[in-house]
Image: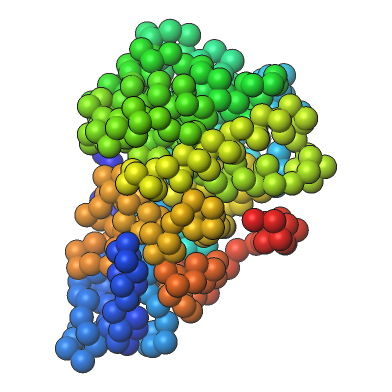
Amino acid sequence: MASRKRHTTVEPFALEHTNIVTGDDEGRTLHDMTIVIDESGRISDVMPSPQIAVPQGYHRIDASGKFVASGLINMHVHLFADGKPIDPRQATPRGQALLAGLVRTPVGRAYIRKKAISGLDTLLNSGVTTIRTVGDVGYTVVGLRDKIAAGKLLGPRVFASGPMLASPGGHGAPLVALECKDEEAARRNAEANIDHGVNAIKIAATGGITDSQVAGEAGSPQMDVASMRTICDAAHACGLIVAAHAQSPEGVMNALTAGVDTIEHGSELTDEMIALFHENPNSLHGYSSLIPTLSAGMSINAFPREVTGITEIQYENSKPVAEGMLEGARQAHMNGIRVGVGTDTGMTFVTQYATWRELYLLTHYAGFTAAEAFYAATRVNAEILGIGGETGSIEVGKCADLLVLDADPTQNLRTLAAPKLVVAAGRPVWRPSVKRFDDIDRRLDERL
Ligand SMILES: [Zn+2]
């Protein structure tokens, strides 16, 4: 279920005389290499150029002077918005209820679908070849995931969560979350998502910033441990990992205890939590990982309210959350916890095309080297998703999820902002380009 086989064929080709970014945490690079991609979209050969024979009939692309790296993976994506400031009126309970009704109309559905397709296209063109959504409006993304896997739509490989699971009136409800009033409802809702074909599950363990209405709501524990445990059991039984939105020490501890596989955003960590990240008996793979999403936490906090449009309460709530998130990321790095990369796209100032900024923030504020940040966004993310054998590095047998770059990203992360060629499962996107929001980019460049 976790990885769907692609049944379509692609035009085979080779990238010749290029530098390969191995993507290990030391940032090793190989020179004058050739990569061969066969008609199944997989890497069939990787060798020093003088030793390789490209099969007859394959397109040969001279990539000398370029750097070929594995495509990025973004673990925290929302496809219902594009990163322009969210109107706080839409995030009130009244606004959410109104929108929840609208998105169920034919026009609303069409809008959500169009938005999702545009987001997928932008992510791919920005060099992201795998995503996990963690809170969708309905199940539109599940359908798009299958279209991509069948070769009918060009896009990144998708792990789709469908709606989040939250406590009544909790974070994301009712627009992007199903409400679980007790353990039984939690089980039913988890199973409903699984029946709709999701291949990721997301829980709101605590309140969030975007829809907070009172001081202290962001990070305040919402779903109880027993309900979260029930959801984890249902998901793990199907081989699915569970993500939990958790923005306070108490919330993180609750979610880890329940057996959640990835903590989204995070907070300051205690020794007990650090130990649970390393070894979590209730998780799917025996450990849990942290996905800090500094892009969302730091962006909303770095600008005056007039710029982001958030309310006074949301601004106040964002401060301790952003500080905790940053501290948690630093501690995780220092203590050897698996840290994955996700940005929380769709939130205010988190566009669909700036995954590279998260890598930059990890290096600038959380102690990562550029090589470590790149490693986190590729190999570590693939491992967390359980697809380490499919993608995350350039190796024979893996899917050809590749970026052709002007520079070595482990030396210069910014080169990731403008890939020259993106290849997703062997399908090339020639001259990738995205529609940028120049004012947002300029502000982020200035402040972060
Ligand atoms: Zn999110």
Q: Nearer the viewer, residue 386 or 370?
A: 370
Residue under the point 35% across and 39% down: 289
Q: Is residue 303 above or below residue 374?
A: above
Residue 235 rendering spot, x and y as whole percentages: 30, 27
Find residue 65 and report its horizontal and vertical position in percent. Answer: 42, 87
Q: Quadrant of the C terminus?
A: bottom right
Which quarter of the picture shows residue 97? Answer: top right
The answer to whether residue 201 of the structure is visible from this angle is no
Q: Position of residue 339 (x, y in %)?
A: 38, 46
Question: Which one is nearer the viewer's eye here, 179 or 445?
Answer: 445
Task: Answer whether residue 44 is visible to the viewer in this image.
Answer: yes
Residue lying farthest to the right in this orientation: 306
Q: Horizontal placement of 312 versus 202: left or right?
A: right
Question: Could you tell me which residue is drawn at 32 percent across and 62 percent down?
Answer: 25
Left or right placement of residue 254 versus residue 25 in this view: right
Instruction: Give the residue furthest to the bottom.
Output: 50
Q: Is residue 418 left or right of residue 41?
A: right
Q: Position of residue 351 (x, y in %)?
A: 61, 52
Q: Quadrant of residue 146?
A: top left
- What residue do we see at 20% from left, 75% from top? 45
